Image (cartoon, coloured by chain):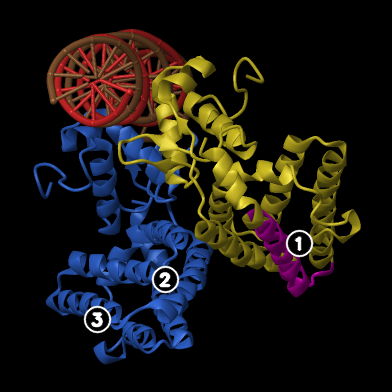
Chain colours: A yellow, B blue, C brown, D red
Amino acid sequence: MDAEIPLPGGDRIAARVHHWLRLQLMRSRFRPGEKLKLRTLAEELGVSPTPVREALGRLVSEGALEQLDHRSARVPLLSDERLREVCELRADLEGKAAARAAELAKPQDADRLAAIHARMSEARVAGRSPEMLVENERFHMEVCTLAGMPVLLRLVESLWLQCGPLNAALTRMRFLHRPEEHPHHDVIRGIREGDSALARLAIQRDITVYADALIRRLPEINVAARE
Amino acid sequence: MDAEIPLPGGDRIAARVHHWLRLQLMRSRFRPGEKLKLRTLAEELGVSPTPVREALGRLVSEGALEQLDHRSARVPLLSDERLREVCELRADLEGKAAARAAELAKPQDADRLAAIHARMSEARVAGRSPEMLVENERFHMEVCTLAGMPVLLRLVESLWLQCGPLNAALTRMRFLHRPEEHPHHDVIRGIREGDSALARLAIQRDITVYADALIRRLPEINVAARE
DNA sequence: GCTTCTAATTTGTTATCACAGATCAGGCCG
DNA sequence: CGGCCTGATCTGTGATAACAAATTAGAAGC
Protein backbone atom coordinates (compact mmCIF):
# COMPACT_ATOMS: atom_id res chain seq x y z
CA MET A 1 0.00 0.00 0.00
CA ASP A 2 1.11 3.55 -0.63
CA ALA A 3 1.13 4.75 2.96
CA GLU A 4 1.07 2.68 6.11
CA ILE A 5 -2.29 4.16 6.96
CA PRO A 6 -4.67 5.69 4.42
CA LEU A 7 -4.16 9.21 5.60
CA PRO A 8 -7.09 11.36 4.56
CA GLY A 9 -10.72 11.68 5.43
CA GLY A 10 -11.06 12.80 9.03
CA ASP A 11 -10.92 10.97 12.33
CA ARG A 12 -13.49 8.35 11.47
CA ILE A 13 -12.01 5.15 10.17
CA ALA A 14 -15.01 4.47 7.95
CA ALA A 15 -14.58 7.87 6.28
CA ARG A 16 -10.88 7.22 5.71
CA VAL A 17 -11.62 3.84 4.16
CA HIS A 18 -14.32 5.36 1.99
CA HIS A 19 -11.96 8.07 0.78
CA TRP A 20 -9.19 5.58 0.16
CA LEU A 21 -11.43 3.21 -1.77
CA ARG A 22 -12.72 6.11 -3.85
CA LEU A 23 -9.18 7.05 -4.77
CA GLN A 24 -8.30 3.47 -5.65
CA LEU A 25 -11.36 3.29 -7.91
CA MET A 26 -10.39 6.52 -9.64
CA ARG A 27 -6.92 5.14 -10.18
CA SER A 28 -8.37 1.91 -11.58
CA ARG A 29 -6.62 -0.22 -9.02
CA PHE A 30 -9.60 -2.57 -9.20
CA ARG A 31 -10.70 -3.86 -12.54
CA PRO A 32 -14.35 -3.84 -13.68
CA GLY A 33 -16.03 -6.99 -12.45
CA GLU A 34 -13.62 -7.51 -9.57
CA LYS A 35 -15.18 -8.48 -6.25
CA LEU A 36 -14.13 -6.52 -3.20
CA LYS A 37 -13.77 -8.68 -0.14
CA LEU A 38 -14.40 -7.40 3.34
CA ARG A 39 -11.71 -9.17 5.32
CA THR A 40 -9.06 -8.81 2.63
CA LEU A 41 -9.44 -5.03 2.53
CA ALA A 42 -9.70 -4.82 6.30
CA GLU A 43 -6.48 -6.73 6.75
CA GLU A 44 -4.65 -4.65 4.17
CA LEU A 45 -5.72 -1.44 5.88
CA GLY A 46 -5.17 -2.80 9.36
CA VAL A 47 -8.72 -2.16 10.57
CA SER A 48 -11.66 -4.32 11.52
CA PRO A 49 -14.26 -5.38 8.95
CA THR A 50 -16.87 -3.05 10.44
CA PRO A 51 -15.75 0.30 8.96
CA VAL A 52 -14.85 -1.38 5.67
CA ARG A 53 -18.35 -2.73 5.55
CA GLU A 54 -19.80 0.75 6.01
CA ALA A 55 -17.54 2.22 3.33
CA LEU A 56 -18.51 -0.47 0.81
CA GLY A 57 -22.18 0.02 1.58
CA ARG A 58 -21.91 3.72 0.94
CA LEU A 59 -20.07 3.22 -2.32
CA VAL A 60 -22.85 0.91 -3.44
CA SER A 61 -25.38 3.61 -2.58
CA GLU A 62 -23.34 6.11 -4.57
CA GLY A 63 -23.34 3.85 -7.61
CA ALA A 64 -19.58 3.37 -7.54
CA LEU A 65 -19.99 -0.29 -6.69
CA GLU A 66 -22.59 -2.84 -7.56
CA GLN A 67 -24.27 -5.21 -5.15
CA LEU A 68 -24.65 -8.79 -6.32
CA ASP A 69 -27.62 -10.90 -5.25
CA HIS A 70 -25.57 -13.08 -2.97
CA ARG A 71 -24.47 -9.97 -1.12
CA SER A 72 -21.06 -9.20 -2.41
CA ALA A 73 -19.85 -5.86 -3.77
CA ARG A 74 -18.03 -5.66 -7.06
CA VAL A 75 -16.78 -3.00 -9.45
CA PRO A 76 -19.53 -2.56 -12.04
CA LEU A 77 -19.12 -3.96 -15.51
CA LEU A 78 -20.26 -1.05 -17.65
CA SER A 79 -22.27 -2.02 -20.68
CA ASP A 80 -22.18 0.08 -23.79
CA GLU A 81 -25.63 1.50 -23.10
CA ARG A 82 -24.89 2.26 -19.50
CA LEU A 83 -21.68 4.08 -20.32
CA ARG A 84 -23.52 6.12 -22.96
CA GLU A 85 -26.20 7.00 -20.43
CA VAL A 86 -23.73 8.10 -17.78
CA CYS A 87 -21.91 10.31 -20.27
CA GLU A 88 -25.12 11.76 -21.65
CA LEU A 89 -26.23 12.71 -18.15
CA ARG A 90 -22.79 14.09 -17.36
CA ALA A 91 -23.00 16.24 -20.51
CA ASP A 92 -26.40 17.59 -19.47
CA LEU A 93 -25.53 18.26 -15.86
CA GLU A 94 -22.00 19.49 -16.28
CA GLY A 95 -23.16 21.59 -19.23
CA LYS A 96 -25.66 23.29 -16.99
CA ALA A 97 -23.02 23.74 -14.32
CA ALA A 98 -20.56 25.31 -16.74
CA ALA A 99 -23.17 27.71 -18.04
CA ARG A 100 -24.14 28.72 -14.52
CA ALA A 101 -20.50 29.07 -13.55
CA ALA A 102 -19.95 31.43 -16.47
CA GLU A 103 -22.71 33.64 -15.12
CA LEU A 104 -21.41 33.69 -11.56
CA ALA A 105 -17.66 33.29 -11.60
CA LYS A 106 -15.11 35.98 -10.89
CA PRO A 107 -11.78 36.32 -12.73
CA GLN A 108 -9.80 34.61 -9.98
CA ASP A 109 -12.11 31.60 -10.33
CA ALA A 110 -11.10 31.28 -13.97
CA ASP A 111 -7.47 31.62 -12.89
CA ARG A 112 -7.89 28.75 -10.46
CA LEU A 113 -9.39 26.60 -13.19
CA ALA A 114 -6.50 27.48 -15.48
CA ALA A 115 -4.03 26.49 -12.79
CA ILE A 116 -5.70 23.11 -12.36
CA HIS A 117 -5.65 22.52 -16.09
CA ALA A 118 -1.99 23.50 -16.25
CA ARG A 119 -1.12 20.96 -13.56
CA MET A 120 -3.12 18.37 -15.45
CA SER A 121 -1.36 19.05 -18.74
CA GLU A 122 1.98 18.97 -17.03
CA ALA A 123 1.22 15.61 -15.45
CA ARG A 124 -0.01 14.40 -18.82
CA VAL A 125 3.14 15.16 -20.77
CA ALA A 126 5.31 13.95 -17.89
CA GLY A 127 3.51 10.62 -17.93
CA ARG A 128 2.26 10.91 -14.34
CA SER A 129 -1.08 9.36 -15.15
CA PRO A 130 -2.61 9.05 -11.68
CA GLU A 131 -1.95 12.71 -10.96
CA MET A 132 -3.37 13.64 -14.34
CA LEU A 133 -6.58 11.77 -13.62
CA VAL A 134 -6.93 13.41 -10.23
CA GLU A 135 -6.39 16.89 -11.65
CA ASN A 136 -8.86 16.24 -14.43
CA GLU A 137 -11.47 15.26 -11.89
CA ARG A 138 -10.62 18.31 -9.84
CA PHE A 139 -11.18 20.52 -12.89
CA HIS A 140 -14.66 19.17 -13.54
CA MET A 141 -15.66 19.31 -9.89
CA GLU A 142 -14.38 22.86 -9.60
CA VAL A 143 -16.62 23.91 -12.47
CA CYS A 144 -19.59 22.42 -10.64
CA THR A 145 -18.55 24.13 -7.42
CA LEU A 146 -18.33 27.46 -9.22
CA ALA A 147 -21.92 27.03 -10.31
CA GLY A 148 -22.95 27.25 -6.67
CA MET A 149 -25.15 24.18 -6.97
CA PRO A 150 -24.21 21.72 -4.24
CA VAL A 151 -26.94 19.23 -5.11
CA LEU A 152 -25.78 19.11 -8.72
CA LEU A 153 -22.22 18.68 -7.55
CA ARG A 154 -23.23 15.59 -5.62
CA LEU A 155 -24.97 14.09 -8.65
CA VAL A 156 -21.99 14.73 -10.90
CA GLU A 157 -19.61 13.20 -8.36
CA SER A 158 -21.73 10.07 -8.35
CA LEU A 159 -21.73 9.86 -12.15
CA TRP A 160 -18.02 10.54 -12.31
CA LEU A 161 -17.28 7.74 -9.92
CA GLN A 162 -19.25 5.31 -12.03
CA CYS A 163 -16.83 5.57 -14.92
CA GLY A 164 -13.81 6.06 -12.69
CA PRO A 165 -12.59 2.46 -13.00
CA LEU A 166 -12.45 2.90 -16.77
CA ASN A 167 -10.24 5.95 -16.72
CA ALA A 168 -7.05 3.97 -16.67
CA ALA A 169 -7.82 3.06 -20.27
CA LEU A 170 -7.54 6.76 -21.11
CA THR A 171 -3.95 6.89 -20.02
CA ARG A 172 -3.06 4.15 -22.44
CA MET A 173 -4.49 6.06 -25.39
CA ARG A 174 -2.80 8.64 -27.50
CA PHE A 175 -3.74 12.25 -26.78
CA LEU A 176 -7.36 13.02 -27.52
CA HIS A 177 -6.56 16.63 -28.39
CA ARG A 178 -3.56 18.67 -29.35
CA PRO A 179 -2.71 20.58 -26.19
CA GLU A 180 -3.73 23.98 -27.51
CA GLU A 181 -7.08 22.62 -28.72
CA HIS A 182 -8.11 21.04 -25.43
CA PRO A 183 -11.77 21.83 -24.68
CA HIS A 184 -10.85 22.91 -21.17
CA HIS A 185 -9.40 26.10 -22.67
CA ASP A 186 -12.78 27.10 -24.05
CA VAL A 187 -14.42 26.20 -20.75
CA ILE A 188 -12.03 28.53 -18.98
CA ARG A 189 -12.51 31.27 -21.58
CA GLY A 190 -16.28 30.94 -21.44
CA ILE A 191 -16.23 31.23 -17.66
CA ARG A 192 -13.77 34.12 -17.71
CA GLU A 193 -15.76 36.07 -20.27
CA GLY A 194 -19.18 35.18 -18.95
CA ASP A 195 -20.05 33.34 -22.15
CA SER A 196 -22.31 30.63 -20.77
CA ALA A 197 -23.09 29.08 -24.16
CA LEU A 198 -19.41 28.65 -24.93
CA ALA A 199 -18.70 27.14 -21.55
CA ARG A 200 -21.56 24.68 -21.88
CA LEU A 201 -20.63 23.57 -25.37
CA ALA A 202 -16.96 23.25 -24.52
CA ILE A 203 -17.50 21.01 -21.50
CA GLN A 204 -19.98 18.96 -23.48
CA ARG A 205 -17.42 18.55 -26.26
CA ASP A 206 -14.87 17.46 -23.67
CA ILE A 207 -17.21 14.83 -22.31
CA THR A 208 -18.36 13.65 -25.73
CA VAL A 209 -14.85 13.15 -27.06
CA TYR A 210 -13.99 11.31 -23.84
CA ALA A 211 -17.11 9.15 -24.12
CA ASP A 212 -16.57 8.24 -27.77
CA ALA A 213 -12.98 7.25 -27.14
CA LEU A 214 -13.98 5.17 -24.14
CA ILE A 215 -16.84 3.46 -25.94
CA ARG A 216 -14.51 2.46 -28.75
CA ARG A 217 -12.22 0.86 -26.22
CA LEU A 218 -14.99 -0.69 -24.15
CA PRO A 219 -14.91 -4.17 -25.74
CA GLU A 220 -11.27 -4.70 -24.97
CA ILE A 221 -11.67 -3.26 -21.48
CA ASN A 222 -14.48 -5.65 -20.65
CA VAL A 223 -12.70 -8.57 -22.23
CA ALA A 224 -9.65 -7.83 -20.15
CA ALA A 225 -11.82 -7.64 -17.05
CA ARG A 226 -13.39 -11.01 -17.72
CA GLU A 227 -10.19 -12.86 -17.01
CA MET B 1 -45.31 1.13 14.73
CA ASP B 2 -47.53 0.04 11.89
CA ALA B 3 -46.43 -3.58 11.72
CA GLU B 4 -44.61 -5.55 14.35
CA ILE B 5 -41.72 -5.95 11.97
CA PRO B 6 -41.04 -3.61 9.07
CA LEU B 7 -41.85 -6.22 6.51
CA PRO B 8 -40.38 -5.20 3.17
CA GLY B 9 -36.94 -5.13 1.66
CA GLY B 10 -35.56 -8.66 1.50
CA ASP B 11 -33.96 -10.92 4.03
CA ARG B 12 -31.30 -8.49 5.14
CA ILE B 13 -32.22 -6.51 8.20
CA ALA B 14 -30.26 -3.48 7.04
CA ALA B 15 -32.22 -3.42 3.79
CA ARG B 16 -35.50 -3.66 5.68
CA VAL B 17 -34.51 -0.81 7.97
CA HIS B 18 -33.38 1.27 4.99
CA HIS B 19 -36.68 0.68 3.23
CA TRP B 20 -38.65 1.44 6.35
CA LEU B 21 -36.78 4.65 7.06
CA ARG B 22 -37.24 5.71 3.46
CA LEU B 23 -40.97 5.21 3.78
CA GLN B 24 -41.09 7.13 7.06
CA LEU B 25 -39.23 10.02 5.43
CA MET B 26 -41.66 10.06 2.51
CA ARG B 27 -44.52 10.12 4.97
CA SER B 28 -42.89 12.96 6.88
CA ARG B 29 -42.86 11.05 10.11
CA PHE B 30 -39.66 12.90 10.95
CA ARG B 31 -39.61 16.66 10.77
CA PRO B 32 -36.87 18.61 9.02
CA GLY B 33 -34.03 19.19 11.46
CA GLU B 34 -34.88 16.20 13.62
CA LYS B 35 -31.97 14.06 14.71
CA LEU B 36 -32.25 10.32 14.18
CA LYS B 37 -30.80 8.35 17.05
CA LEU B 38 -29.28 4.95 16.58
CA ARG B 39 -30.38 3.15 19.69
CA THR B 40 -33.85 4.67 19.72
CA LEU B 41 -34.59 3.43 16.22
CA ALA B 42 -32.95 0.09 16.91
CA GLU B 43 -35.08 -0.46 19.97
CA GLU B 44 -38.27 0.55 18.20
CA LEU B 45 -37.56 -1.90 15.39
CA GLY B 46 -36.32 -4.60 17.70
CA VAL B 47 -32.93 -4.95 16.05
CA SER B 48 -29.36 -4.18 17.05
CA PRO B 49 -27.76 -0.82 16.28
CA THR B 50 -25.55 -2.34 13.58
CA PRO B 51 -28.05 -2.61 10.71
CA VAL B 52 -29.65 0.70 11.69
CA ARG B 53 -26.26 2.29 11.44
CA GLU B 54 -25.75 0.93 7.95
CA ALA B 55 -29.16 2.13 6.83
CA LEU B 56 -28.54 5.63 8.17
CA GLY B 57 -25.14 5.77 6.48
CA ARG B 58 -26.66 4.84 3.17
CA LEU B 59 -29.41 7.42 3.50
CA VAL B 60 -26.74 10.04 4.14
CA SER B 61 -24.95 8.92 0.98
CA GLU B 62 -28.19 9.18 -0.93
CA GLY B 63 -28.74 12.73 0.27
CA ALA B 64 -31.88 11.84 2.19
CA LEU B 65 -30.20 12.62 5.49
CA GLU B 66 -27.53 15.06 6.50
CA GLN B 67 -24.45 14.26 8.53
CA LEU B 68 -23.60 16.76 11.22
CA ASP B 69 -20.02 17.47 12.26
CA HIS B 70 -20.47 15.79 15.59
CA ARG B 71 -21.41 12.62 13.73
CA SER B 72 -25.13 12.48 14.02
CA ALA B 73 -27.63 12.10 11.20
CA ARG B 74 -30.56 14.44 10.87
CA VAL B 75 -33.34 15.21 8.43
CA PRO B 76 -32.03 18.07 6.26
CA LEU B 77 -33.36 21.57 6.77
CA LEU B 78 -34.00 22.64 3.19
CA SER B 79 -33.15 26.24 2.47
CA ASP B 80 -35.03 28.16 -0.17
CA GLU B 81 -32.10 27.95 -2.59
CA ARG B 82 -31.56 24.25 -2.03
CA LEU B 83 -35.21 23.43 -2.59
CA ARG B 84 -35.17 25.47 -5.79
CA GLU B 85 -32.07 23.64 -6.96
CA VAL B 86 -33.50 20.21 -6.27
CA CYS B 87 -36.67 21.06 -8.14
CA GLU B 88 -34.79 22.60 -11.06
CA LEU B 89 -32.71 19.44 -11.40
CA ARG B 90 -35.80 17.29 -11.09
CA ALA B 91 -37.43 19.30 -13.87
CA ASP B 92 -34.42 18.79 -16.12
CA LEU B 93 -33.94 15.12 -15.44
CA GLU B 94 -37.56 14.05 -15.24
CA GLY B 95 -38.27 16.17 -18.31
CA LYS B 96 -35.66 14.21 -20.21
CA ALA B 97 -37.06 10.96 -18.87
CA ALA B 98 -40.60 11.83 -19.91
CA ALA B 99 -39.47 12.77 -23.40
CA ARG B 100 -37.53 9.54 -23.76
CA ALA B 101 -40.45 7.56 -22.37
CA ALA B 102 -42.72 9.09 -25.00
CA GLU B 103 -40.37 7.79 -27.69
CA LEU B 104 -40.13 4.28 -26.30
CA ALA B 105 -43.32 3.44 -24.47
CA LYS B 106 -46.04 1.10 -25.67
CA PRO B 107 -49.76 1.66 -25.14
CA GLN B 108 -49.95 -0.63 -22.14
CA ASP B 109 -47.25 1.45 -20.47
CA ALA B 110 -49.46 4.51 -20.74
CA ASP B 111 -52.32 2.43 -19.33
CA ARG B 112 -50.22 1.50 -16.34
CA LEU B 113 -49.39 5.14 -15.73
CA ALA B 114 -53.04 6.04 -15.98
CA ALA B 115 -53.87 3.36 -13.42
CA ILE B 116 -51.31 4.73 -10.99
CA HIS B 117 -52.67 8.24 -11.43
CA ALA B 118 -56.20 6.99 -10.88
CA ARG B 119 -55.22 5.35 -7.60
CA MET B 120 -53.47 8.56 -6.60
CA SER B 121 -56.50 10.73 -7.36
CA GLU B 122 -58.76 8.34 -5.53
CA ALA B 123 -56.55 8.43 -2.46
CA ARG B 124 -56.46 12.21 -2.75
CA VAL B 125 -60.20 12.77 -2.67
CA ALA B 126 -60.64 10.10 -0.01
CA GLY B 127 -58.16 11.90 2.21
CA ARG B 128 -55.74 8.98 2.40
CA SER B 129 -52.69 11.20 2.23
CA PRO B 130 -49.89 8.68 2.79
CA GLU B 131 -51.20 6.47 0.03
CA MET B 132 -51.54 9.47 -2.25
CA LEU B 133 -47.91 10.43 -1.66
CA VAL B 134 -46.73 6.91 -2.37
CA GLU B 135 -48.72 6.68 -5.59
CA ASN B 136 -47.46 10.06 -6.72
CA GLU B 137 -43.90 8.91 -6.22
CA ARG B 138 -44.69 5.70 -8.04
CA PHE B 139 -46.01 7.69 -10.99
CA HIS B 140 -42.84 9.73 -11.35
CA MET B 141 -40.56 6.75 -10.91
CA GLU B 142 -42.56 4.77 -13.45
CA VAL B 143 -42.01 7.52 -16.02
CA CYS B 144 -38.26 7.28 -15.41
CA THR B 145 -38.40 3.50 -15.66
CA LEU B 146 -40.22 3.75 -18.98
CA ALA B 147 -37.36 5.88 -20.28
CA GLY B 148 -35.10 2.86 -19.97
CA MET B 149 -32.45 4.91 -18.19
CA PRO B 150 -31.52 3.18 -14.93
CA VAL B 151 -28.78 5.65 -14.05
CA LEU B 152 -31.17 8.55 -14.42
CA LEU B 153 -33.73 6.71 -12.33
CA ARG B 154 -31.24 6.48 -9.51
CA LEU B 155 -30.49 10.20 -9.66
CA VAL B 156 -34.16 11.12 -9.64
CA GLU B 157 -34.83 8.81 -6.71
CA SER B 158 -32.13 10.59 -4.78
CA LEU B 159 -33.54 14.03 -5.58
CA TRP B 160 -37.04 12.91 -4.78
CA LEU B 161 -36.01 11.65 -1.38
CA GLN B 162 -34.42 14.98 -0.56
CA CYS B 163 -37.73 16.78 -0.59
CA GLY B 164 -39.66 13.80 0.74
CA PRO B 165 -39.86 15.11 4.31
CA LEU B 166 -41.59 18.23 3.01
CA ASN B 167 -44.34 16.41 1.20
CA ALA B 168 -46.56 16.24 4.22
CA ALA B 169 -47.06 19.98 3.79
CA LEU B 170 -48.67 19.24 0.44
CA THR B 171 -51.41 17.24 2.03
CA ARG B 172 -52.39 20.17 4.17
CA MET B 173 -52.81 22.44 1.14
CA ARG B 174 -55.84 22.85 -1.02
CA PHE B 175 -55.73 21.11 -4.36
CA LEU B 176 -53.05 22.43 -6.69
CA HIS B 177 -55.07 21.60 -9.77
CA ARG B 178 -58.63 20.82 -10.64
CA PRO B 179 -58.66 17.06 -11.16
CA GLU B 180 -59.23 17.21 -14.92
CA GLU B 181 -56.39 19.74 -15.36
CA HIS B 182 -53.76 17.73 -13.51
CA PRO B 183 -50.46 17.77 -15.47
CA HIS B 184 -50.21 14.00 -15.14
CA HIS B 185 -52.94 13.71 -17.75
CA ASP B 186 -50.79 15.46 -20.33
CA VAL B 187 -47.82 13.33 -19.33
CA ILE B 188 -49.86 10.22 -19.99
CA ARG B 189 -51.20 11.63 -23.25
CA GLY B 190 -47.72 12.63 -24.41
CA ILE B 191 -46.40 9.18 -23.68
CA ARG B 192 -49.37 7.45 -25.26
CA GLU B 193 -49.17 9.53 -28.44
CA GLY B 194 -45.39 9.61 -28.66
CA ASP B 195 -45.38 13.39 -28.21
CA SER B 196 -42.11 13.83 -26.33
CA ALA B 197 -42.33 17.63 -26.19
CA LEU B 198 -45.75 17.46 -24.54
CA ALA B 199 -44.62 14.84 -22.05
CA ARG B 200 -41.57 16.86 -21.10
CA LEU B 201 -43.44 20.12 -20.67
CA ALA B 202 -46.24 18.50 -18.71
CA ILE B 203 -43.97 16.83 -16.18
CA GLN B 204 -42.00 20.05 -15.85
CA ARG B 205 -45.21 21.96 -15.21
CA ASP B 206 -46.16 19.39 -12.57
CA ILE B 207 -42.84 19.84 -10.81
CA THR B 208 -42.84 23.62 -11.11
CA VAL B 209 -46.30 24.04 -9.65
CA TYR B 210 -45.32 21.67 -6.84
CA ALA B 211 -42.10 23.58 -6.24
CA ASP B 212 -43.72 27.00 -6.18
CA ALA B 213 -46.36 25.87 -3.73
CA LEU B 214 -43.76 24.28 -1.50
CA ILE B 215 -41.46 27.30 -1.58
CA ARG B 216 -44.34 29.54 -0.53
CA ARG B 217 -44.92 27.27 2.46
CA LEU B 218 -41.26 26.81 3.26
CA PRO B 219 -40.98 29.51 5.95
CA GLU B 220 -43.73 28.06 8.07
CA ILE B 221 -42.42 24.52 7.53
CA ASN B 222 -38.97 25.45 8.75
CA VAL B 223 -40.35 27.49 11.62
CA ALA B 224 -42.41 24.53 12.71
CA ALA B 225 -39.35 22.32 12.49
CA ARG B 226 -37.29 24.62 14.66
CA GLU B 227 -39.34 23.84 17.73
C1' DG C 1 -32.14 34.26 39.64
C1' DC C 2 -28.52 33.38 36.36
C1' DT C 3 -24.19 31.66 34.92
C1' DT C 4 -20.60 28.17 35.16
C1' DC C 5 -18.21 24.16 36.25
C1' DT C 6 -18.37 19.30 36.78
C1' DA C 7 -20.12 14.64 36.73
C1' DA C 8 -23.40 11.35 34.87
C1' DT C 9 -25.59 9.92 30.95
C1' DT C 10 -26.25 9.56 26.22
C1' DT C 11 -24.65 8.65 21.51
C1' DG C 12 -21.83 7.22 17.78
C1' DT C 13 -17.75 4.33 16.57
C1' DT C 14 -15.13 0.24 16.34
C1' DA C 15 -13.61 -4.42 17.43
C1' DT C 16 -14.81 -9.08 18.40
C1' DC C 17 -17.72 -12.99 18.24
C1' DA C 18 -21.21 -16.21 16.54
C1' DC C 19 -23.93 -17.63 12.73
C1' DA C 20 -25.73 -18.77 8.04
C1' DG C 21 -25.38 -19.10 3.36
C1' DA C 22 -22.29 -19.64 -0.48
C1' DT C 23 -18.26 -21.45 -2.58
C1' DC C 24 -14.91 -24.70 -3.50
C1' DA C 25 -12.20 -29.17 -3.02
C1' DG C 26 -11.76 -33.62 -2.88
C1' DG C 27 -13.50 -38.00 -3.17
C1' DC C 28 -17.09 -41.30 -4.38
C1' DC C 29 -20.11 -43.42 -7.58
C1' DG C 30 -21.67 -44.16 -12.24
C1' DC D 1 -12.83 -40.44 -17.17
C1' DG D 2 -16.61 -37.45 -15.79
C1' DG D 3 -20.57 -35.83 -12.99
C1' DC D 4 -22.29 -35.32 -8.38
C1' DC D 5 -22.34 -35.28 -3.56
C1' DT D 6 -20.31 -33.82 0.86
C1' DG D 7 -17.61 -31.46 4.13
C1' DA D 8 -14.24 -27.68 5.04
C1' DT D 9 -13.48 -22.97 4.26
C1' DC D 10 -14.69 -18.48 2.94
C1' DT D 11 -17.66 -14.36 3.18
C1' DG D 12 -21.11 -11.33 4.57
C1' DT D 13 -24.44 -10.26 8.41
C1' DG D 14 -25.96 -9.13 12.93
C1' DA D 15 -25.44 -8.80 18.03
C1' DT D 16 -22.70 -7.43 21.92
C1' DA D 17 -19.30 -5.00 24.47
C1' DA D 18 -15.81 -1.51 25.26
C1' DC D 19 -14.43 3.17 24.28
C1' DA D 20 -14.46 8.19 23.39
C1' DA D 21 -16.68 12.29 22.45
C1' DA D 22 -20.56 15.05 23.27
C1' DT D 23 -24.50 16.42 25.53
C1' DT D 24 -27.17 17.13 29.52
C1' DA D 25 -28.28 17.81 34.44
C1' DG D 26 -27.38 19.32 38.76
C1' DA D 27 -25.18 21.85 42.08
C1' DA D 28 -22.26 25.51 43.54
C1' DG D 29 -20.88 30.31 43.22
C1' DC D 30 -21.80 35.09 41.88
The answer to which of marks 2 and 3 sits earlier in the sequence is 3
- Mark 2 belongs to which subunit? B
Marks 3 and 1, Cα distance to the nearest angstrom? Answer: 47 Å
Q: Amino acid at mark 3?
A: Asp
Q: Which mark is residue B111?
A: 3
Q: Secondary structure at mark 1?
A: loop
Q: Is residue A77 above or below residue C12?
A: below
Marks 2 and 3, Cα distance to the nearest angstrom? Answer: 15 Å
Q: Is residue B184 above or below residue B128?
A: below
Q: Amino acid at mark 2?
A: Ala
Residue B50 in sight in this render: no
Disc 2 to disc 3: CB gap under 8 Å: no
Compare residues C24 and B182 and report the one nearer the observer. C24
Both marks 2 and 3 on one chain: yes
Q: Residue at x 55, y 53 (%)?
A: A159
Residue C14 quadrant: top left
Magenta span: A193-214
Q: Residue at x 48, y 39 (%)?
A: A33
Q: Secondary structure at mark 2?
A: loop
Q: Secondary structure at mark 3?
A: helix
Q: Which mark is residue A105?
A: 1
Looking at the image, the residue that sits furthest to the left is B4
Marks 2 and 1, Cα distance to the nearest angstrom? Answer: 35 Å
Both marks 3 and 1 on one chain: no
Residue B102 quadrant: bottom left
Counting from the top left corner in percent of width and height, residue B212 is at 44, 76
**Magenta region includes residue A120:** no
Looking at the image, the residue that sits furthest to the right is A180
Counting from the top left corner in percent of width and height, residue B154 is at 42, 57
Q: Which mark is residue B147?
A: 2
Position of residue B189 in the picture relative to residue A78 (left or right): left
Q: Which mark is residue A151?
A: none
